[in-house]
Image (spheres, rainbow, N blue to C red):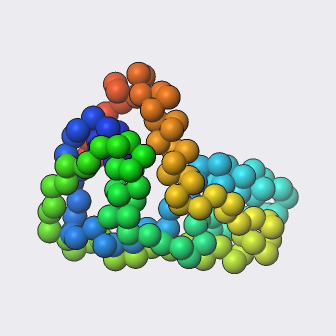
Amino acid sequence: RFIKWIAEGTPVTLFGDGEQTRDFTYIDDIARGTIAATQALGYQVINLGGGKKPVSLNYIISLIEQHLGKKAIIQYQPFHKADILETQANISKAERVLGWKPQTDVEEGLRKTVEWYLKHQNWLKDISCEEGN
């Protein structure tokens, strides 16, 4: 949503100061992990994620701005009391059981995602990114 909003000049609502961190994972890495998990393992819970490398939302926004060559319009709102300051995945079981770990760092993954967005924005313009949808 942030890529679409920034590209279109739509204000980005940011709760808190943007320093909360998230453990982003590139879609190709998640797809590889999901496919690896289809092997006959029985029922197990296995986390797939960035591998304890959380980055701030401010950093993500700055990368998107760089790749789009456009400044985000940010509307700051109070930090939501139900939100958390940091998320990160413990992927040790995925590494041990599936031999899986992410191969794409957040910078490369975001670059590829922005490139994909720009290539497909003709049909993406009609997709709603409103809160709650």
Q: Is residue 30 above or below residue 130?
A: below
State which quadrant residue 51 falls in: bottom right
The x and y percentages for residue 45 are: 66, 68
| Residue occupying the far right of the picture | 40
Query: In the drawing, does residue 67 fall left or right of residue 34?
Result: left
Q: Is residue 51 above or below residue 112?
A: below
Quadrant housing the C terminus: top left
Can residue 133 be spotted in the picture? no
Q: What residue occupies the far top of the structure in this picture?
A: 122
The quadrant where residue 124 appears:
top left
Identify which residue, 74 or 29, lies in the foreground. 74
Seen at 31% across and 73% down, the residue is 19
Q: Is residue 111 left or right of residue 125?
A: right
Please report the residue visible at 35 percent of the width from the left and 27 percent of the height from the top. Answer: 125
The residue drawn where x is 83% and y is 56% is 39
How many numbered marks have been drawn onto this rendered protein structure?
Answer: 0
- Identify the residue at horizontal 51%, vertical 48% (top origin): 111
| Residue 6 x/y as whole percent | 29, 43
| Nearer to us in this view, 79 or 119 | 119
- In this rendering, does residue 97 appear at all? yes
Determine whether, in the image, residue 40 is placed left or right of residue 74.
Answer: right
Residue 84: x percent and y percent? 33, 75
Q: Position of residue 32 (x, y in %)?
A: 72, 52
Name the quarter where the N terminus is drawn: top left
Q: Is residue 7 above or below residue 72?
A: above
